Image: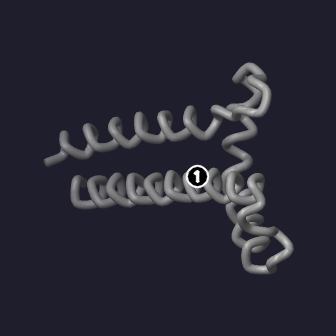
Amino acid sequence: MDAIIVPFFNLVIAALQIYVWCLLISVILSWLVAFKVINTSNRFVYMVGDFLYRITEPALGRIRRFLPNMGSVDLSPVVLILLIIFVQEILTRLALKFY
């Protein structure tokens, strides 16, 4: 059974790490757009931004409902990254039990 569970846990951990990278890229891209370093009228920038928005916004929106409004500071990516790290640690500990 551990021949199936351990690779599955490793796959989930890798997918969560990719999602963390998408969150970080989304945050950096939103800063670059806000400071007018890059422009969303560029089709490639728009497509990347739209893709990142579509995959990150459902999770970030749920977290924003519970966080207080702090003006222009959005702490939901930080909270989500911390939650993902927590889940990754739990999965790592569970995978180590099967070794």
Q: Residues within 10 Å of mark 1 (few under 14, many from 20)?
A: many
Instruction: Please name the colour scheme applied to the rendered image.
Output: one colour
Q: Position of residue 67 (x, y in %)?
A: 70, 23
Q: Position of residue 16 (x, y in %)?
A: 47, 52
Q: Position of residue 25 (x, y in %)?
A: 58, 58
Question: Horizontal placement of 40 versus 4: left or right?
Answer: right
| Quadrant in the rendering for residue 79 | top right
> Which three-letter amino acid code belongs to the residue tagged 1?
Leu
Query: Eyeballing the image, is 27 above or below 63?
Result: below
32 and 14: which one is in front? 32
Q: Position of residue 47 (x, y in %)?
A: 76, 73
23 and 28: which one is in front? 28
Q: Residue furthest right?
A: 41
The quadrant of the image that shows the N terminus is bottom left
- Which residue is rendered at x = 80% and y = 80% of the image? 43
Name the residue that disc number 1 marks. 23
24 and 71: which one is in front? 71
Question: Horizontal placement of 38 versus 23: left or right?
Answer: right
72 and 96: which one is in front? 72
Query: Eyeballing the image, is 84 above or below 52?
Result: above
Is residue 54 visible to us here? no
- Which residue is rendered at x = 71% and y = 63% of the image? 37
